[in-house]
Image: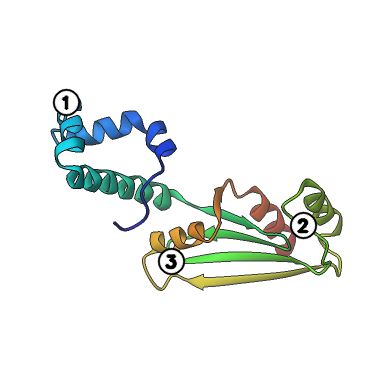
Amino acid sequence: MKYARLTKEQFDELHAEFASFLATQAIDKAEWDALKVNKPEVAEQELDVFSDLIWEGVLSRAEYLEHFSRNHIFLFQCFETHVQSIVLKSLVEETDFLTTEGLQWLSDNMFTENIEMKVGKKVFTEDRNASIFELIQQGAFLSDGQLFSQINSIIES
């Protein structure tokens, strides 16, 4: 398995897609039910292959990621060969970007000495999708890129 198995909730959401996936392998509902009972290891493999296919599609389309922690916000824009990053760090210890108040504080203090901002670029040294998946495993999530774009346009002007 290249990535991670989807959760039960994710499989529930993708029920129709999973049924289509099984159909492409000539596995109908009755055969799937039999596989789960008689050959659970084969059923597990099918779940893993489907999970990897879904992850591969999602990661291939991934363009923006965000990761929030108490004192840091990591914003990423993913390209084919590299990732651009903007890292915001609060220099005020009691700031908490995980709260609405913390985000409001950020908005009020964005371009003050209370915020340290670093911009970077990292070339993918391994598979692009594997690199993006690693960021997700560390807590990043896919985003629409609005925050990255807003901050980046201010930095560039």
**Does 44 sit left or right of 151 as displayed?**
left
Say whether residue 58 is left or right of residue 83.
Answer: left
Q: Which residue is mark 2?
A: 96
Visible in this render: residue 157?
no
- Could you tell me the amino acid type at mark 1? Ala
The crowding category of the residue bearing disc 1, from other C-alpha atoms within 10 Å (few below 14, some 14 to 19, many at least 20), is few
Give the mark nearer the N terminus: 3 vs 1: 1
Q: What residue is shown with label 3?
A: 81
| Residue drawn at the location 60% of the way across and 50% of the way down | 145
Q: Quadrant of the N terminus?
A: bottom left
Q: Earlier in the sequence, mark 3 or mark 2?
A: 3
Residues at marks 3 and 2 touching, judged by CB atoms closer than 8 Å: no
Quick one: 33 or 4, which is closer to the camera?
Answer: 33
Query: Regarding mark 3 in the picture, which secondary structure is present there?
Result: loop
| Mark drawn on residue 30 | 1
Q: Is residue 54 above or below residue 19?
A: below
Single out the mark in the foreground, 3 or 1: 1
- Measuring from the top left, give residue 148's x and y in whole percent: 65, 55
Which mark is first along the chain, 1 or 2? 1
Q: Amino acid at mark 3?
A: Thr
How crowded pointer 3 is (Cα within 10 Å; few <14, some 14-19, many 20+) is rated as few
Q: CA distance from mark 2 to mark 1?
A: 52 Å
How is the structure coloured here?
rainbow
